[in-house]
Image (cartoon, helix red, strand yellow):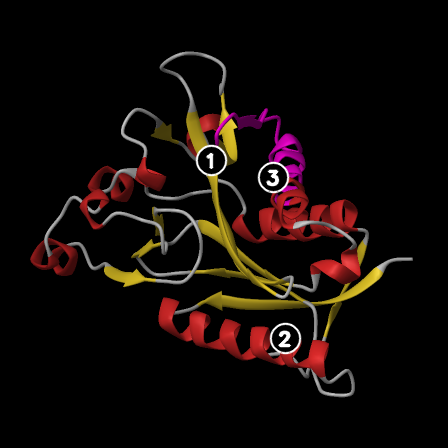
Amino acid sequence: MKREVAYVDFGLIDYQEAWDKQRVLFNQLLNRKVHPTEEGHDCFILCEHSHVYTLGKSGVDANLLISDDFLQKIGATYYKIDRGGDITYHGPGQIVGYPIIDLEKFEVSLKDYIHKIEDMIILTIAEYGIVGERLDGATGVWIDSCIPGKARKICAIGVKASRFITMHGFALNVNTNLDYFTYINPCGFVDKGVTSMEVELGRTLDFEEVKKVTAEKFESVFNANLYNSAEVK
C-alpha cells in the first residue's frame, strides 16, 4: 500500500523561515506519535534558498574559510543547525529537499532512509544521462567516485531524526553557482570536489522540471503517493 505524503513547495525561501516551518511540521508529526488523534502530516518539501552556509552539529567551524565581513560581501549567511554532517552551501539553482516523515510507517531504518534518498537522487539525475554513485565512508551522491582525484559531489545529505521522525534532508546542485563552495571545505572534505547537473551536461536545466522528476522519484523509491494539501504550508 502506498503511503500518503503531503507535497509542499516553499519556492525560493529564506533559510531561517524554512527551518522554522520545518520545526513546526516536525513537532506536529512527533506529537502525533504520542497522541494519534492530533494533527500531523508526513511531508515532502522542496525549496530553494538564497546564499547560505549551514554547519551540522558534528561540524567544525574551521571548515568555513571566510570571515563574517566576507560573508556579508558575498551576500551569504551562516547557521549552526541540528542536523548531522559538517558544513554545506545552499543557494539559487539548487534543489533543497526536506522530507519530514515517520520512518516507522515506511518500515525503514535511518541507515536505509539515507540510502533511499541517495537512490532517489541517483534515479533523478539518471533521467538526464548522469551516472550518480555512492562513495564509501561518505553520504550523498557522487560522480566518478572510484576514480582517484576525480570524485565530485553532486548532492549532499544531512538529516536529523527523533523517534524515527526526520527533518532536514538533501541538496541537489542543478544550476548552482559552484564558486560559493570554494569558501568552505564541503562536508568537511579537503580533497574532493563538487559539481552540478549544469556543469556535467554543459547546459542550464529547467529547474522546475528537475523538481518534478525528483518528486516522482521520491514516490517511486518510498512507495508513496504525493498529494497537495492546503493544511500544510
The location of residue 185, given as percent across then percent down, is: 26, 38
Task: Of the two numbered discs 1 and 2 on the same chain, state the one appearing first in sequence.
Answer: 2
Q: Which residue is more in the foreground, 95 or 204?
A: 95
Placement of the N terminus among the 4 image quadrants:
bottom right
Q: Which mark is residue 154?
A: 1
The location of residue 42, given as percent across then percent down, is: 70, 69
Q: CA distance from mark 1 to mark 3?
A: 11 Å
Q: Residues within 10 Å of mark 3 (few under 14, many from 20)?
A: many
> Which residue occupies 44% across, 32% down?
153
Look at the image and give the residue range highlighted in magenta. Answer: 117-137
Q: Amino acid at mark 1?
A: Ile
Task: Report the mark closest to the observer, 1 or 3.
Answer: 3
Placement of the C terminus among the 4 image quadrants:
bottom right
Q: Is residue 2 left or right of residue 187?
A: right
Label 1 close to label 2 by CB (< 8 Å): no
Q: Is residue 119 magenta?
A: yes
Q: Considering only vertical position in the picture, is 43 above or below 186?
A: below
Q: CA distance from mark 2 to mark 3?
A: 24 Å
> Which residue occupies 70% across, 58% down?
103
Q: Considering only vertical position in the picture, is 160 above or below 28?
A: above
Task: Report the mark closest to the observer, 2 or 3.
Answer: 2
Describe the element under mark 3 as helix, strand or loop.
Answer: helix
Q: Is residue 123 left or right of residue 155?
A: right
Q: Quadrant of residue 112?
A: top right
Q: Amino acid at mark 3?
A: Glu
Task: Of the two numbered discs 1 and 3 on the same chain, state the one appearing first in sequence.
Answer: 3
Q: Say which residue label 3 marks.
A: 118
Q: Is residue 184 left or right of residue 170?
A: left
Describe the element under mark 2 as helix, strand or loop.
Answer: helix
Q: Is residue 65 magenta?
A: no
Q: Say which residue label 2 marks.
A: 30
